[in-house]
Image (cartoon, grey):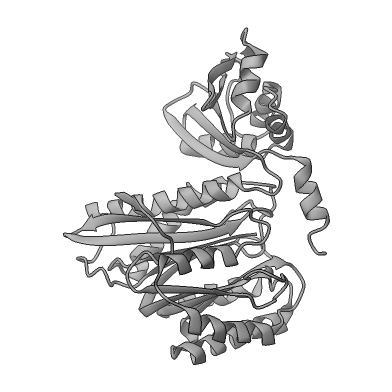
């Protein structure tokens, strides 16, 4: 596997565009298009929140029906959530406008929205934006990056990555982009991710690869514990790499899954580290567990603990908060056997051994916790299973951003 430059336009046959449609923001792009020169197999995972945005319902319907997909239209600023029949109708209007502008099937258009809940989409601006996108699309890496920027809301930077693998002497490319900074606690799968590949692979196998991987990537991140109404991960495959078809369970399938995992984990970590007001990516490794389920439960409980997150913000090795979060997680373990370490580029330090503090240097711990990427490692000494979760510190900035978000 090789990491290459680019995102959603890195794979063969994909084009992208961005435009400033004035959906909510002024003076910046706020709409993006992903277009495939040929129809694609489509897979998707979506929010488990009972309150689902109109575009989520639309995309679920398209993916479930197995309709070949050729375009994705995304807007930022307004989520089109809790908007009733009118909001769903705007999804239909969006697909119709895209179909007319691109000369493709209306039911082959997927839609993504992110932003304020409860407001109706200004459909006239959206459709005008679609026509601008259709005229501006191309397959350059620059247009892919511009699309990644256009879907941001409170994100501080775009998030994209691409990789290549060899399948049957053919080069297969996988590229993706994502947005997410607040209302991040995916549990499907506000967070959007769009991944493109030129691999020859069936819709069923594509869905299996995505569904299996989200559990170890997007489902293992949290910024604020709020599962969005709009969480969506879309994976498209157009087959233009002309590789031998990737079959479920084969060596090629596992190679493709590794490539997909690299994209998903990178984007998931970028989302977690770009949490609203965050100053650090906070990684938690639960090791020495008797099952993966136990490890995931412990890691997610620690990374979601507000008290732990504020300790990370203060560069404070307040290990009692971590042990506390483990204790209320629901996972069973012996607290008197737990070892805890902190680690970053500044070094590694053990904080507790067998459930009690060791004689460590607070100054050294603070130095380690002052890095922009910090890891806590909790060893419960019960087995050989492990899991990793990602989050961020919790600062005053989170409150400032969200107190004023609608205005």
Residue furthest to the left in view is 169
Q: Where residue 305 sits in the image (x, y, percent)?
A: 69, 36
| Foreground of the two, 358 or 155 | 155
Residue furthest to the top in view is 359
Q: Where residue 15 sits in the image (x, y, percent)?
A: 42, 74
| Foreground of the two, 210 or 71 | 71
228, above or below 290, in the image: below
Q: Left of 84 or right of it: where is 127?
A: left
Look at 62% across and 86% down and name the residue there: 128
Q: Quadrant of residue 206?
A: bottom left
Q: Left of 313 or right of it: where is 247?
A: left
Look at 64% across and 75% down and name the residue there: 54
Q: Quadrant of residue 403?
A: bottom right
- Residue 247 appears anywhere in the view: no
Q: Where residue 358 sits in the image (x, y, percent)?
A: 61, 9
Look at 28% across and 51% down and name the residue there: 255
Q: Left of 193 or right of it: where is 275?
A: right
Q: Quadrant of the C terminus?
A: bottom right
192, above or below 181, in the image: below
Look at 49% across and 21% down and name the residue there: 381
Q: Where residue 30 sits in the image (x, y, percent)?
A: 63, 71
């Amino acid at each position: 596997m090789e990491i290459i430059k680019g995102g959603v336009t890195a794979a063969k046959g994909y084009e992208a565009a961005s435009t400033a449609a004035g959906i909510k923001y002024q003076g910046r792009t706020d709409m993006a298009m992903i277009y495939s020169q040929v129809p694609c197999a489509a897979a998707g995972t979506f929010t488990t929140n009972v309150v689902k945005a109109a575009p989520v319902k639309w995309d679920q319907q398209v993916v479930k029906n197995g309709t070949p997909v050729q375009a994705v239209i995304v807007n930022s600023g307004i989520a089109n959530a809790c908007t009733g029949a009118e909001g769903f109708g705007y999804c239909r209007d969006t697909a119709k406008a895209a179909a007319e502008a691109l000369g493709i099937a209306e039911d082959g258009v997927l839609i993504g929205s992110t932003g304020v809940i409860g407001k109706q989409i200004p459909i006239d601006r959206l459709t005008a934006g679609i026509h601008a996108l259709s005229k501006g699309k191309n397959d350059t890496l620059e247009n892919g990056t511009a699309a990644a920027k256009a879907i941001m809301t409170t994100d501080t930077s775009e998030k994209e990555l691409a990789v290549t693998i060899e399948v049957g002497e053919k080069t297969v490319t996988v590229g993706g982009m994502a947005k997410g900074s607040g209302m991040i606690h995916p549990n499907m799968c506000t967070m959007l991710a769009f991944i493109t590949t030129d691999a020859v692979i069936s819709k069923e196998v594509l869905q299996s690869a995505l569904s299996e991987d989200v559990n170890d990537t997007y489902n293992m991140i949290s910024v604020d514990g709020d599962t969005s109404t709009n969480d969506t991960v879309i994976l498209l495959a157009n087959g233009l790499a002309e590789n031998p078809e990737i079959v479920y369970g084969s060596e090629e399938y596992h190679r493709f899954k590794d490539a997909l995992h690299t994209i998903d984990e990178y984007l998931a970590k970028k989302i977690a580290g770009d949490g609203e007001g965050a100053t650090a990516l906070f990684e938690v490794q639960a090791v020495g567990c008797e099952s993966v389920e136990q490890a995931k439960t412990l890691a997610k409980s620690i990374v979601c603990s507000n008290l732990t997150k504020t300790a990370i913000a203060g560069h404070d090795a307040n290990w009692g908060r971590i042990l506390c979060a483990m204790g209320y997680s629901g996972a069973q373990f012996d607290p008197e056997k737990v070892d805890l370490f902190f680690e970053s580029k500044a070094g590694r330090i053990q904080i507790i051994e067998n459930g009690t503090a060791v004689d460590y240097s607070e100054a050294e711990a603070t130095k380690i916790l002052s890095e922009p990427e910090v890891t806590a490692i909790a060893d419960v000494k019960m087995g050989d299973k492990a899991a990793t979760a990602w989050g961020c510190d919790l600062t005053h900035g989170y409150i400032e951003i969200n107190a004023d978000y609608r205005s």
